[in-house]
Image (tube, helix red, strand yellow):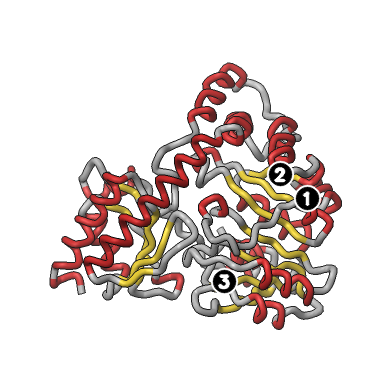
Amino acid sequence: MKLTIPTYIQAIEPYVPGKPLEALEREYGISDSVKLASNENPLGPSPKALAAIRNGLTALHRYPDGAGHLLTRKIASANGILPTNVVIGNGSDDIIALLVRALIRPGDRVIVPRPSFLMYAISASAAGAVVDAVPLKDLTMDLDAMAERVTADTRLVFVCNPNNPTGTVVTQTAFDRLMNRLPADVVVVVDEAYIEFVSNPDCLKTGQPSDVNRPLVTLRTFSKVYGLAGLRVGYGIMPASLAEILNRVRPPFNVNSMAQVAAAAALDDQAFLQQTVGLVHRGLDELYGALDRMGLSYFKTEANFFLIDVGQPADVVFENMLRQGVIVRSMRAYGFPTYIRINVGLESENRRFLRALETVLSRKDTR
């Protein structure tokens, strides 16, 4: 079959997700593996979300609520905004794609931090946009440099807070400087997928009632702190005029029925949220201490994941960790050739990771 594919599509490097547990066990002939590669919630889903799913199973023969009435109103109430300021999606990636579809034409410019979540650049490139990737400064997004790169053709600016994969945050002061320098027709998208884990009081947090009157979109997800990654549900908070445009191009059933009821119930489960955050912070302290004793360098984080310098090719360490039954993420593709990224797991998983890492790094053939 001979197809004519636009050059800007051919140039896209596909997103490579973390390796699934099933694939690891099948390929390496092992069992009882541990996955710390995809920043998932080690506690599993919110119990209230599970109960809501069980209660909703008998209605699977019906189409979902295309408007997401219950979930949209729950989100609005939790954030002190109106339902007209909310757009729900099949994960927050879906909102990124909707924004690009609605606002970008071929040749428009989109500014992204580098390294950061790869879907910003992939979605923009798929629409024929010119992606301007601005390097981090001291592992943090350089918002002043991003503002300087804005041109008359710029339509979107992406900010990841906390940033994936570095776990660093931007401050309200730095963000206000960015917003004050941008033309009114440039939309800033702040991805807050990990905002619930932040302990730094100076960290920017958007999605406030006053933000819906600005050219600003806040992205949130139920995949992380609420433990619903397998259901793919997220949302955007934005001006009502922009939400109305996105809802014109949003597929009518982009968020399935189980995802809607589970996410709505998860918003009520603040006890589970606090349990998850507490587990992550305790796990980080334990992991930091163990890595200090091993003499390894790492970057402290405001998220549930962080970077570790293993002092040798990360791809090799990744492969050898797989043979130990532990899945981590190599950061070579993100510009950190000797770094791996892990997320915090259960206490038993964290300790297994540490034992496996010690074993792998002690072997001469890993270099």
3D distance between C-alphas at marks 3 and 1: 40 Å
Q: Nearest the camera: 264 or 10? A: 264
Number of disc labels: 3
Where does label 2 land, which residue? 79
- Residue 19 seen anywhere in this rendered image of the structure: no
Q: Which residue is drawn at 45% across and 63% down?
A: 301
Q: What residue type is labelled 2?
A: Asn
The image quarter containing residue 288 is bottom left
Residue 183, image x and y in percent?
83, 73
Dot 2, crowdedness within 10 Å: few (<14), some or many (≥20)? Answer: few
- Residue 29 seen anywhere in this rendered image of the structure: yes
Q: Going by the image, does 75 lie left or right of 365?
A: right
Q: Residue at x 75, y 43 (%)?
A: 80
Q: Which residue is drawn at 73% across and 74% down?
A: 177
SS for dot 2:
helix
Where does label 1 land, which residue? 209
Residue 37, image x and y in percent?
38, 54
For residue 85, above or below residue 65: below
- Quadrant (top left, top right, bottom left, bottom right) of the N terminus: bottom right
For residue 35, above or below residue 61: below
Task: Tell me whether circle 3 and circle 2 mark residues in contact (CB < 8 Å).
Answer: no
Tell which circle, 3 or 2, labels the residue nearer the N-terminal end: 3
SS for dot 1:
helix
Task: Tell me whether circle 3 and circle 1 mark residues in contact (CB < 8 Å).
Answer: no
Task: Tell me whether circle 1 and circle 2 mark residues in contact (CB < 8 Å).
Answer: yes
Q: Going by the image, does 364 lie left or right of 7?
A: left
Where does label 3 land, which residue? 11
Q: Which amino acid does label 3 sit on?
A: Ala
Dot 3, crowdedness within 10 Å: few (<14), some or many (≥20)? Answer: few
3D distance between C-alphas at marks 1 and 2: 7 Å
Tell which circle, 1 or 2, labels the residue nearer the N-terminal end: 2
Tell which circle, 3 or 1, labels the residue nearer the N-terminal end: 3
